[in-house]
Image (cartoon, rainbow, N blue to C red):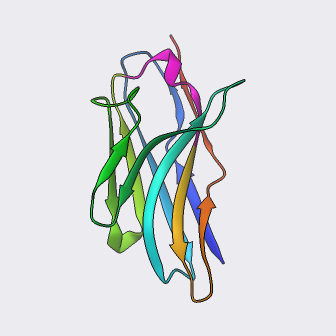
Amino acid sequence: QVQLVESGGGLVQPGGSLRLSCVASGSIFSLHYMGWYRQAPGKQRERVAQIFRTANTNYADSVKGRFTISIDNAKNTVYLRMDTLKPEDTAVYYCNARISTRSTLQDYWGQGTQVTVSS
């Protein structure tokens, strides 16, 4: 059993910052990558950022230069630092991870955390 638990969402003014955290726990044999997706009302879920154990990263064009993803491999925790937030960043943010257990290799998802950027 593997769980992803997110924290750190909330309401912030335009130009402000937030940091999201996501902890993976359970019967983890190997963690291949972790990342963040977001879904705004009426829109499809989109990948925001992804990080591998090697620390290689990918970012959506819309967040490059403003968001920073990092990982603490020892704690199976991924962070998303969001700076210079814009109203269009408002969405539910979901943590994602590809994890091997003793018997499976699959993607797991967190429950989501709301980020609202508004004055």
Vertical relation: 110 (above or below) 39: below
Please give the name of the residue rendered at 53% of the width and 49% of the height, measured from the top-left corner: 7
Residue, far right: 42
Compared across the picture, whether 85 is left or right of 100 comes to left
Please give the name of the residue rendered at 61% of the width and 63% of the height, measured from the top-left corner: 108
Write down the quadrant of residue 73 in the picture. Answer: bottom left
Which residue occupies the foreground of this view, 7 or 27?
Answer: 27
Find residue 76 and report its horizontal and vertical position in percent.
42, 69
Vertical relation: 29 (above or below) 113: below
Write down the quadrant of residue 84 in the picture. Answer: top left
Please give the name of the residue rendered at 49% of the width and 84% of the height, measured from the top-left corner: 29
Find residue 101 and report its horizontal and vertical position in percent.
57, 82
Please give the name of the residue rendered at 49% of the width and 56% of the height, measured from the top-left corner: 22
- Residue 49 on the magenta span: no
Looking at the rendering, the stretch of residues picked out in magenta corresponds to 85-93
Find residue 21 and report its horizontal and vertical position in percent.
45, 51
- Residue 91 on the magenta span: yes
Compared across the picture, whether 29 is left or right of 3 comes to left
Find residue 71 and report its horizontal and vertical position in percent.
34, 59
